[in-house]
């Protein structure tokens, strides 16, 4: 049976977190949950119920409505979105939480991470699948900062901000991961929307509408650095435990965050934070692609040399065999007779 790219991706993710150890929660599974109910003790949470999701995506050819699972916890209520700990209630704490392409959408990242930490066991894990801004439609957008995260938190933002929505609409471009890895970055004249469209979306935010957007733009290195910075500020009880950088010709990276134990003293907390990953270098995508091509060519050359040596060894064995020697003795007189008759 041939595995689909989605199957291979999910199998890779399952190597990062053991979902069989305790109950878990997957945020926003839509129609393709990473962890299915036959794999583990999992619950699903989303902004909308399954029926609402089916209605919302009824005309989207990319969503298989029949595969949308039962949503156990619904975040939206009569007065708007509710806090995650309030919604999951007695089902918490969880041993693990998974969120694929979610963190970049949350209006208040600091509050969201705090809610995740609140529903995790001590030592529990948060597995994130995060788009790398260098290989998506965000490629022209400026990287976001901890300062912007602090501002969103101070304002208690519950919707994507004017900044986020304007920047996305104004700078979004069509680009494939393959093109971006080759260094083929679209120019400003290739943006999908004009200035008027960007201002129109910004005005919708001002008018009180929830305009879904990528609020935060990450690279693997930037993500690790910013999570560590939030920890040093005392604003997060999560540390990066594992990071899988964006694979060649792909557009997302994987991160596992671990929930620090509750009740630690100052020194104990500092030691626990120091055990997390605090920084990695983002590699240059074009250089990495060239290195991969060079490695492939070198591998081909090594294989060719090995095959040549093998053939030469086989030829030497044939020449040394009795059959070869006999063939040579028979062939020599025949060749001499041929030369005689040709004179």
Image: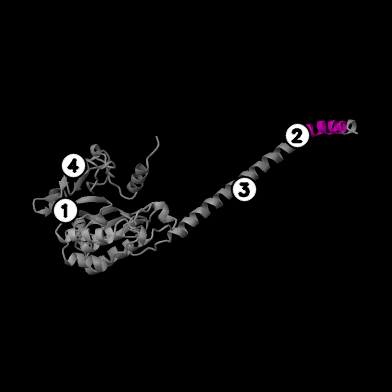
Q: Does 328 lie within the magenta span?
A: yes
Tag 2 residue: 324
Q: Where is residue 119, by image quadrant? A: bottom left
Q: Which residue is pictured at 23% across the width and 39% down the height? A: 65
The answer to whether 47 appears left or right of 303 in the picture is left
Mark 1 touching mark 2, by CB under 8 A? no
Tag 3 residue: 305
The relative height of residue 326 versus residue 272 in the rendered view (above or below) is above
- Which of marks 2 and 4 precedes in the sequence? 4
In magenta, the rendered stretch is 320-338
> Considering the numbered disc 1 on the image, is that residue within a helix, a strand or a loop?
helix
Q: Which residue is pictured at 88% across the width and 32% down the height? A: 342
Mark 1 touching mark 3, by CB under 8 A? no
Q: Which mark is residue 55?
A: 4
Q: Quadrant of the N terminus?
A: top left
The relative height of residue 142 versus residue 136 in the rendered view (above or below) is below
Between the C-alphas of marks 3 and 4, the distance is 60 Å
Q: Quadrant of the C terminus?
A: top right
Viewer-proximal residue, 240 or 261? 240
Between the C-alphas of marks 1 and 2, the distance is 81 Å
Q: Nearer the viewer, mark 3 or mark 4?
A: 4
> Considering the numbered disc 2 on the image, is that residue within a helix, a strand or a loop?
helix
- Which of marks 3 and 2 precedes in the sequence? 3
Mark 4 touching mark 2, by CB under 8 A? no
- Which of marks 4 and 1 precedes in the sequence? 4
Q: Nearer the viewer, mark 2 or mark 3?
A: 3
Between the C-alphas of marks 2 and 3, the distance is 26 Å
Tag 1 residue: 84
């Amino acid at each position: 049976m041939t595995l689909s790219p989605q199957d291979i991706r999910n199998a890779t993710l399952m190597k990062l977190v053991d979902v069989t150890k305790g109950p878990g929660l997957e945020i926003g599974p839509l129609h393709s949950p990473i962890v299915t109910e036959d794999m583990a003790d999992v619950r699903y949470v989303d902004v909308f119920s399954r029926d609402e999701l089916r209605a919302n995506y009824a005309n989207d050819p990319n969503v298989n409505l029949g595969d949308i699972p039962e949503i156990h916890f619904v975040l939206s209520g009569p007065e708007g979105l509710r806090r995650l700990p309030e919604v999951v209630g007695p089902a918490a704490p969880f041993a693990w939480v998974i969120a694929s392409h979610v963190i970049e959408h949350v209006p208040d990242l600091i509050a969201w991470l705090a809610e995740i930490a609140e529903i995790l066991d001590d030592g529990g894990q948060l597995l994130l699948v995060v788009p790398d801004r260098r290989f998506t439609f965000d490629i022209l957008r400026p990287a976001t900062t901890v300062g912007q995260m602090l501002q969103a938190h101070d304002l208690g933002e519950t919707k994507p901000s004017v900044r986020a929505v304007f920047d996305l609409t104004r700078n979004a471009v069509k680009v494939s991961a393959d093109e971006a890895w080759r260094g083929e970055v679209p120019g400003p004249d290739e943006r999908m929307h004009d200035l008027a469209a960007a201002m129109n979306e910004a005005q919708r935010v001002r008018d009180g509408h929830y305009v879904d957007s990528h609020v935060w733009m990450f690279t693997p290195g930037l993500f690790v650095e910013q999570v560590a910075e939030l920890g040093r500020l005392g604003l997060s009880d999560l540390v990066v435990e594992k990071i899988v950088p964006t694979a060649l010709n792909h557009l997302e990276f994987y991160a596992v965050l671990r929930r620090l134990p509750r009740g630690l003293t100052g020194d104990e907390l500092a030691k626990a934070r120091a055990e997390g990953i605090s920084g990695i270098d983002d590699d240059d995508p074009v250089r990495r692609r060239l290195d991969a091509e060079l490695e492939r060519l070198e591998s081909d050359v090594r294989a060719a040399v090995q095959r040549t040596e093998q053939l030469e060894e086989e030829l030497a064995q044939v020449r040394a065999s009795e059959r070869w020697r006999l063939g040579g003795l028979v062939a020599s007189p025949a060749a001499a007779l041929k030369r005689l008759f040709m004179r």
